[in-house]
Image (spheres, rainbow, N blue to C red):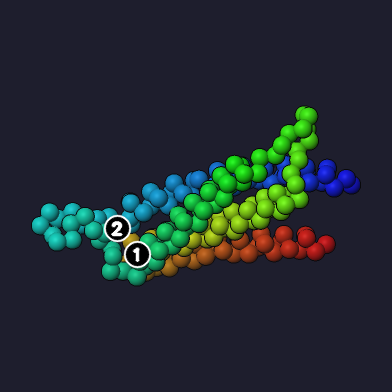
Amino acid sequence: MDPANNDTRIIKMVRDAAQIHLVVATLLVTVTFAAGFTLPGGFESDKDSSDKGMAILTKKSAFCAFVVTDAIAFVCSAGAVFSHFVMAMTHRPKIEGQSDIVLTHKELRILMKTYRLATILLFLSMSAVVIAFVTGLYATLENSVGLAATVCVIGCLAFLIYVLVFYVICIEANK
């Protein structure tokens, strides 16, 4: 197979996948941003309270874990969006004719490294969102231990799914 043809195929695959990643990362940025301002448990609304406007659950560890993991998810997804933006702006293929996409070897290497970084950030963001979801629900359901524990178990299924997907990929890659 012609190396230039293979590079063109790789670039097209990366660009197609990057479009999907960008949509997911943008949705995660939006959701985590909104979750940061619509906190579980709500805000103190008593006008005579010294804590007026503060989150009600700030003293609960599950709530603190929610806030931290939501912030991690936001930063990682924003980093993924930024990485995709940089890829689009700095690694625009030069189009020669109708179908040839040309990048130097160095540009292709940088494109692939940026793509991998964006993918890792997106995976970290997805993991942090699951933890934020579970801890946010746990903080609000703490008085109902059975329901809170059920939510934690169901949330952990997401990580089981992640492991299974990586397992399948590794098995197929080694065939």
Residue labelled with disc 1: 63
- At a point 14% along the width and 55% down the height, the residue shown is 46
Is residue 165 depicted above or below 103 in this figure? below
In the displayed structure image, the side of residue 149 where residue 16 appears, left or right? right
Q: Which mark is residue 41?
A: 2
Classify the position of the C terminus by image quarter.
bottom right
Question: Along the line of sight, which residue is nearer the eye, 56 or 10?
Answer: 10
Marks 2/1 in contact by CB < 8 Å: the verdict is: yes
| In-image side of 55 versus 76 (left or right) | left
Q: Quadrant of residue 157?
A: bottom right
Left or right of 67 on screen, residue 174: right
Dot 1 alpha-carbon crowd within 10 angstroms: few under 14, some 14 to 19, many 20 or more = many
Q: Earlier in the sequence, mark 2 or mark 1?
A: 2
Q: Which residue is depicted at the point 35% across and 66% down?
A: 64
Distance between mark 2 and mark 1 Cα atoms: 9 Å
Residue 166 locus on image (x, y percent): 67, 62
Look at the numbered disc 2 and give the secondary structure of its residue: loop
Indicate the amino acid at tag 2: Gly
Work out whether residue 11 or residue 97 is closer to the camera in this orientation and state it: 97
Residue at image location 33% in from the left, 51% down from the top: 38
Residue 19, quarter of the rendered image = top right
The amino acid type found where label 1 is placed reads Phe
Q: Position of residue 12 (x, y in %)?
A: 72, 42
Q: Nearer the viewer, mark 2 or mark 1?
A: 1
Q: Position of residue 67 (x, y in %)?
A: 37, 61
- Mark 1 residue element: helix
41 vs 98: above or below: below
Disc assigned to residue 20: none
